[in-house]
Image (tube, helix red, strand yellow):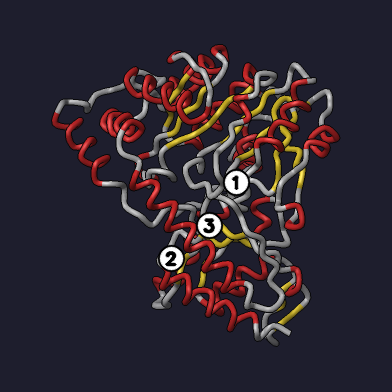
């Protein structure tokens, strides 16, 4: 078998990093394939099945003949449902032609980067950030500018930090709330302060990733696009994977200024065209149907969050906050840097996560992938039994580090 030299590959792909969450998940599968009992807490995927009423809607759509190509920006009936959802849940007003449905929120963000960025344009990314933001920006020719917050600030970047990071090359401010990987939720007041900063710069756009909107433990979700001074320069990204446990359905969407929505449709039309037909019909139904299963999932995640925090707080050296959304805990583990079990040295979060994988057989993700190399991410989208056992193993493993 011939080996392809990296020199034949584009500089673009050589600059890209492999997704750390996918990489860790593969390492865990490989270890499991060797016969080890591995508990994976690395992927951001609800462990619940898609609710039955949504699956039934997809089956009905298949029977009704929804098996053909769809319009590039999405079925009109789904975009109508999204328009109503934006108004109902977010106080956002979009026309149908301002909404684009894609093959997952990840494609939505890639479309936006390709539509908005020229070579050298800067994107302020509030960090810790979702693992793919930076590489998507680089792929589109942009320059990621990471603005960081630590655990003492609940991992939330201030408006003053955003203001200080703006230059004449800034094109986008990009963030998620509730946040992956930290679970932090920006309050309405915090978002208003950031909106006021951006509003003073007429050429800067906001991309607000709200994919975890329905897994929010606060009293209400706030959308930055609802503030009048930035509503015409905010693109709101959402999807069905987290709140409806529809990860494999690959359906995301945006609400955007018309020119940007049309540009995203143009790009998508050359790459993938429209998302699958019967999935879109099921998604339309999901937005209008009983939300009880979503609310029950949120309750389960909240219970698990409290349990995981209680267990992690018993491990010496772990610094843990109390995130208000999503299904992640992001402990600071600098206490263990410079330690060893006599065979393995732990000098950073990457070392720590590999040590945990091979010594505790628990897969977690290094914070370095999220712009925070002194932390690691635990996904508590797993059974209570697995979570208890995983944290017990982690505690035993780190006790050997001196």
Q: Which residue is mark 2?
A: 29
Quarter of the image for the C terminus: give it. bottom right
Q: CA distance from mark 2 to mark 3?
A: 10 Å
Residue 306 rendering spot, x and y as whole percentages: 54, 64
Which of the labelled discs sits on residue 23, or is there none?
A: 3
Q: Earlier in the sequence, mark 2 or mark 3?
A: 3
Which SS class for mark 3?
A: helix
Q: Front-most of 85 and 157? A: 85
Kind of element beneath mark 1:
loop
**Category of crowding for the residue at label 2, using alpha-carbon neighbours closer than 10 angstroms: few (below 14), some (14–19), many (at least 20):** some
In primary-sequence order, the first of circles 2 and 1 is 2
Whole-number angstrom distance, CA of label 2 to CA of label 1: 26 Å
Q: Residue furthest front?
A: 219
Label 3 and label 1: CA atoms lie apart by: 21 Å
Q: Secondary structure at mark 2?
A: helix
The answer to whether the residue labelled 3 contacts the one labelled 1, judged by CB atoms less than 8 Å apart, is: no
Identify the residue at image location x=63%, y=73%. Answer: 313
The residue lying toward the viewer, choosing from 381 and 100, is 381
Q: Is residue 342 above or below residue 279?
A: below
Residue depicted at x 38% and y 46%? 294
- Residue 149, percent across and down? 76, 49
- Whether residue 153 sits left or right of residue 358 in the image: it is right
User: Based on the displayed image, in which of its 4 quarters is residue 353 positioned?
Assistant: bottom right
Mark 2 vs mark 1, foreground winner is 1
Question: Which residue is rendered at x = 77% and y = 41% of the image?
Answer: 158
Q: Does the CB distance between marks 2 and 3 fall below 8 Å?
A: no
Query: Is residue 223 left or right of 250 when viewed as pictured?
Result: right
Residue 32 in the image: above or below residue 267: below
Q: Which residue is mark 1?
A: 179
Task: Specify the quadrant that holds the N terminus.
Answer: bottom left
Label 1: how many Cα within 10 Å (few below 14, some 14–19, many 20+): many
């Amino acid at each position: 078998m011939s080996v392809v030299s990296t020199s034949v590959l584009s500089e673009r792909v050589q600059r890209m990093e492999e997704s750390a969450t996918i990489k860790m998940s593969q390492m865990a599968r490989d270890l499991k394939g060797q016969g080890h009992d591995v508990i994976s807490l690395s992927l951001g995927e609800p462990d619940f099945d898609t609710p039955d009423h949504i699956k039934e809607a997809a089956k009905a759509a298949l029977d009704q003949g929804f098996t053909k190509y769809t319009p590039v920006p999405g079925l009109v009936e789904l975009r109508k449902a999204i328009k109503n959802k934006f108004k109902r849940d977010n106080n956002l007003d979009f026309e149908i032609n301002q909404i684009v449905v894609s093959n997952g929120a990840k494609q939505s963000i890639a479309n936006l980067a390709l539509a908005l960025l020229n070579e050298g344009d800067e994107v302020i990314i509030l960090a810790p950030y979702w693992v793919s933001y930076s590489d998507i920006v680089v792929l589109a020719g942009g320059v990621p500018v990471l603005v960081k917050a630590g655990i003492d600030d609940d991992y939330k970047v201030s408006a003053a930090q955003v203001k200080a990071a703006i230059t004449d090359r800034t094109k986008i401010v990009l963030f998620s709330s509730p946040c992956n990987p930290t679970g932090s939720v920006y309050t309405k007041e915090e978002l208003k302060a950031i909106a006021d900063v951006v509003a003073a710069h007429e050429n800067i756009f906001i991309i607000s990733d709200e994919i975890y909107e329905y897994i929010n433990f606060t009293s209400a979700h706030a959308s930055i696009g609802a503030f009048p001074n930035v509503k015409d320069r905010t693109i709101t990204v959402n999807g069905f994977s987290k709140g409806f446990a529809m990860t494999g359905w690959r359906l995301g969407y945006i609400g955007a200024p018309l020119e940007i929505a049309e540009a995203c449709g143009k790009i998508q039309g050359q790459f993938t065209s429209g998302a699958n037909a019967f999935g879109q019909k099921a998604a339309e139904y999901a937005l209008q149907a009983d939300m009880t299963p979503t609310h029950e999932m949120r309750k389960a995640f909240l219970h698990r969050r409290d349990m995981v925090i209680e267990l992690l707080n018993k491990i010496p050296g772990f610094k843990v906050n109390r995130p208000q959304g999503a299904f992640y805990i992001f402990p600071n583990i600098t206490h263990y840097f410079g330690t060893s079990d006599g065979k393995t040295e732990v000098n950073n979060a990457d070392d720590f996560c590999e040590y945990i994988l091979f010594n505790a057989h628990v897969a977690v993700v290094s914070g370095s992938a999220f712009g925070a190399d002194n932390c690691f991410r635990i996904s508590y989208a797993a059974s209570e039994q697995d979570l208890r056992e995983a944290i017990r193993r982690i505690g035993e493993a780190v006790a050997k580090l001196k």
